[in-house]
Image (spheres, rainbow, N blue to C red):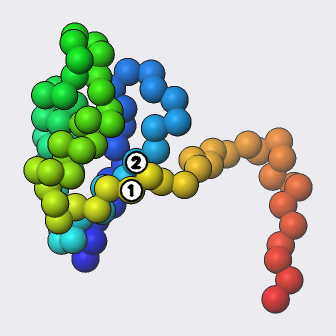
């Protein structure tokens, strides 16, 4: 069974939406460690991450992982507009 992990950028980076899909069950700690390593060892300086380089390093070190830019949008809850929902017709 595949596992899907959402990568978080280091710092306040906007429009960074990447996910990792592993071909087999993988512990979140392993992905966290790998992503942290990639960000740490590609940074241009203290608090200057290079996310593009980090993604490339992650791909090099874990070639079986699929790393894709996600088009998924986080959806929250807004109770004030709940009644605007219209059910689809079958």
The numbered disc on residue 54 is none
Which residue in the protein does label 2 denote? 18
Give whichever of 53, 87 is nearer the camera.
Answer: 53
Compared across the picture, whether 3 is left or right of 87 comes to left
- Estimate the x, y position of residue 53 in percent, counting from the top left: 26, 35
Q: Using the rendered image of the protein, determine whether residue 32 is visible from the camera's viewpoint.
A: no
Reply above or below: 83 against 48.
below
Whichever of callouts 2 and 1 sits on the residue coming sooner in the sequence is: 2
Q: Using the rendered image of the protein, determine whether residue 77 is visible from the camera's viewpoint.
A: yes
Compared across the picture, whether 28 is left or right of 13 comes to left
Tell me where residue 63 sits by quadrant.
bottom left
The residue located at (32%, 33%) in the rendering is 51
Disc 2 secondary structure class: strand
Circles 2 and 1, Cβ within 8 Å, touching? The answer is: yes
- Estimate the x, y position of residue 14 in percent, counting from the top left: 51, 29
Residue at the bottom extreme of this rendering: 90
The residue located at (18%, 71%) in the rendering is 24
Give whichever of 88, 55 is nearer the camera.
Answer: 55
Compared across the picture, whether 74 is left or right of 62 comes to right
Which residue in the protein does label 1 denote? 68
- Estimate the x, y position of residue 25 in percent, counting from the top left: 18, 68
């Amino acid at each position: 069974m595949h596992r899907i992990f959402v990568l978080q950028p280091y710092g306040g980076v906007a429009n960074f939406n990447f996910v990792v899909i592993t071909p087999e069950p993988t512990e979140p700690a392993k992905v966290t460690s790998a992503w942290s390593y990639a960000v740490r060892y590609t940074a241009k300086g203290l608090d200057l991450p290079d996310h593009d380089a980090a993604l490339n390093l992650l791909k090099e070190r874990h070639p079986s992982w699929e790393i894709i830019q996600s088009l998924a949008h986080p959806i929250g809850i807004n109770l004030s507009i709940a009644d605007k929902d219209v059910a689809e017709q079958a």
